[in-house]
Image (cartoon, rainbow, N blue to C red):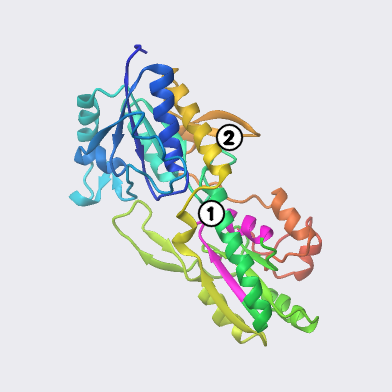
Amino acid sequence: MPKAFRVGVLTGGGDAPGLNAVIRAVTKSLILQHNAEVVGIEDGFQGLIEQDVRPLTYRDVSGILTRGGTILGTSNKANPFSYHRRGGADVSAEVLHFIHDLGLDALVVIGGDGSMSISHGLYERGVPIVGVPKTIDNDIVGTDRTFGFDTAVSIATEAIDRLHTTAQSHNRVMIVETMGRYAGWIALYAGVAGGADVILIPEIDFDLEAIARVCREREDGGQRFTIVAVAEGARPQGGEMVVAKRVEDSPDPIRLGGIGRFLEAELRTRVQSEVRTTILGHMQRGGTPTAYDRNLATCFGAYAAAMVAGGQFGRMVALQDGHFTSVDLASVANRTRTVPLDAPMVATALAVGTSFGVSDFDRRLNPTAPVPGVV
């Protein structure tokens, strides 16, 4: 690669704490280590479609490490292969021409599984791309962690901590609904950290009566409250995920949400305690990133810059077994990393008596027993 080259950077999909830290690390590393010119693409892939870009200088990215969100803006609807503003038309050829006109030698895409899928499609059409995994859901295949996850878990854990006091004071069952889409990582980690009595995740279909039994046993045992952490994608045995709405012009039109309210209505007829629900929603994606997410995002960004300089395209930065590496975008595209049932955190939760809402209540005391309703 020539001594001086141009690199585009964009943030796609939903926002997540740590995006600015990656932008900063990519830009500073490319400028300081490789004498590169960096171009910021506004609002994700939409900036490539609508030709909305701006230079990113060293000064532009100074002081943004601690800021949430993204200084470049983002969009979860701007798919070049099916652009919603043009009736779902494939505008990828226009994007390729614009990238050529910009004189970009590489493109760094910071995003989730949807952005990685789009990146793979563009790479197959000749765009030299390096991906950086971003999502609070921690559900991208090929990496043990995504930045944004630790912050989301910290926010959810703090919410559970605060709900403990009101649950104890009022003898209530408190249901906390987290985000996470089709994976239960946030509910699992926040539930364990917050001492939830029941954790419900999409990977294990739950039994309503098993959950009610936990609540009743705690009532009978003199414990004045029960905390239930439920992932938005969790569902009852024989039932479906609760869909809040559909956004037809989005790559993933389904918006999950409402499982907490469903649980509240069902448990009210089964337990004596009051039942209340708190839906955390987008607050899990906002605010200042934790120190862990800042460090992870910075390492990802610096590693991505090194990959660009080394011509390692068509790949995504990854963290595996404590080491930074990269994986083929083809192995990431259109896939979701769910919680394996033999995950250490699942075993830990079971060891301290946490229920996962399975039909056999004693399952929580025997991690090796078969699980009814596993999907």
Q: Is residue 161 above or below residue 26?
A: below
Q: Is residue 54 visible?
A: yes
Between label 2 and label 1, give the one nearer the viewer. Answer: 1
Q: Is residue 27 left or right of residue 230?
A: left
Q: What x and y, as percent, mark residue 333?
A: 44, 40
Q: How many marks?
A: 2
The magenta segment: 174-193
Crowd tier of the residue under label 2, counting other residues whose Cα lies within 10 Å: few below 14, some 14–19, many 20 or above: some
Of the pair 184 and 125, the residue shown nearer to us: 184
Q: Is residue 307 above or below residue 148?
A: above
Task: Tell me the number on the disc at residue 61.
Answer: none
Q: Which residue corresponds to the image point at 52% horizontal and 29% vertical from the top-left?
A: 326
Q: Are marks 2 and 1 in contact (CB under 8 Å)?
A: no
Find the distance from the CA under tag 2 to the CA under tag 1. 18 Å
Q: Is residue 116 left or right of residue 184?
A: left
User: Magenta span has 134?
Assistant: no
Which residue position holds label 1?
Answer: 152
Q: Which residue corresponds to the image point at 32% horizontal and 46% vertical from the top-left?
A: 73
Which residue position holds label 2?
Answer: 319
Place residue 173 in its image quadrant: bottom right
Q: Earlier in the sequence, mark 2 or mark 1?
A: 1
Instruction: Look at label 2 and name its amino acid.
Output: Leu
Instruction: Look at label 1 and name its amino acid.
Output: Ala
Q: Quadrant of the C terminus?
A: bottom right
Q: Quadrant of the N terminus?
A: top left
Q: Secondary structure at mark 2?
A: strand
Q: What x and y, as percent, mark residue 329?
A: 45, 33
Q: Is residue 158 left or right of residue 120?
A: right
Q: What x and y, as percent, mark residue 276?
A: 57, 79
Q: Is residue 310 above or below residue 336?
A: above
Q: What x and y, as percent, mark residue 290?
A: 55, 47
